[in-house]
Image (spheres, rainbow, N blue to C red):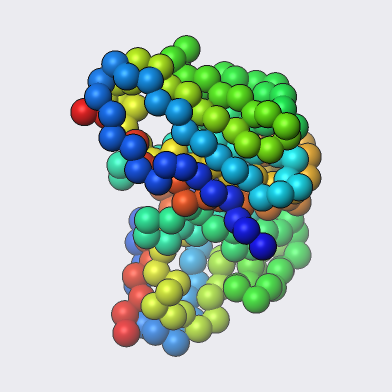
Amino acid sequence: GAGVSQSPSNKVTEKGKDVELRCDPISGHTALYWYRQSLGQGLEFLIYFQGNSAPDKSGLPSDRFSAERTGGSVSTLTIQRTQQEDSAVYLCASSLGLAGSTRDTQYFGPGTRLTVL
Amino acid sequence: DAKTTQPNSMESNEEEPVHLPCNHSTISGTDYIHWYRQLPSQGPEYVIHGLTSNVNNRMASLAIAEDRKSSTLILHRATLRDAAVYYCILWYGGTSYGKLTFGQGTILTVHP
């Protein structure tokens, strides 16, 4: 079946602009996760959703970052007033079971490469 | 958070076995050992996971030391498509809400 999809695949924006990144999880997956990967760095966890709820937003780098999920499906990560340090690949993952289930597997999308000029 | 230690890089020849080590000396009893890999320009991909016993699947085998302070991911016959960054991750039992904490991983190079 279809995997996790993300759009756009690439986004170039100017400093100070707002951007929206979209994630379509695998159908039926209840949990959804956002990570980011800066050039040459490991993956940094940002936020997760169980259904439409995000119980803990402390992983978001600043208050310029927000995320929402509607209908238990699509999620949007919004970055306001982008800065150059926001440049990274933003990855979305989804999993079938409850977030935190130690047996569950996360399926990752291909990512959105964000470049802030 | 319990941490993992992996070699920065390893090399192998095609069709030879590869043993990727991971040390996790501060592992707790509820931590599962997960392995993901990331191929160039792609998102991470699940490989295998285990708790105490050795595990096998179609992609690889996971050998876990008796004291659980180390583990080894085994690719039985490396192919060029196995060239990737391999991450060893401890997933905390029930408290990490799905947060995977990725380290720097091991860059595997496979030579033809």
Q: Is residue A59 visible?
A: no
Q: Is residue B13 above or below residue A11?
A: below
Query: How many discs mark residues in the rendered view?
Result: 0
Q: Position of residue A101 (x, y in %)?
A: 76, 43
Write the residue at 71% across / 49% down. A27
A65 relative position to B90: left or right: left
Q: Position of residue A33 (x, y in %)?
A: 60, 37
B71 relative position to B20: left or right: right
Q: Position of residue A25 (x, y in %)?
A: 63, 45
**Front one among B16 and A12:** A12
Write the residue at 59% across / 63% down. B47
Write the residue at 52% across / 20% down. A66
Which image quarter holds the C terminus of chain B? bottom left
- Furthest residue to the bottom? B15
Q: Is residue B72 above or below residue A61?
A: below
Q: Picture quarter containing residue B67?
A: bottom right
B39 relative position to A92: left or right: left
Q: Position of residue A31 (x, y in %)?
A: 70, 39
Q: Is residue A8 above or below residue B15?
A: above
Write the residue at 44% across / 38% down. A90
Q: Is residue A15 above or below residue B79?
A: above
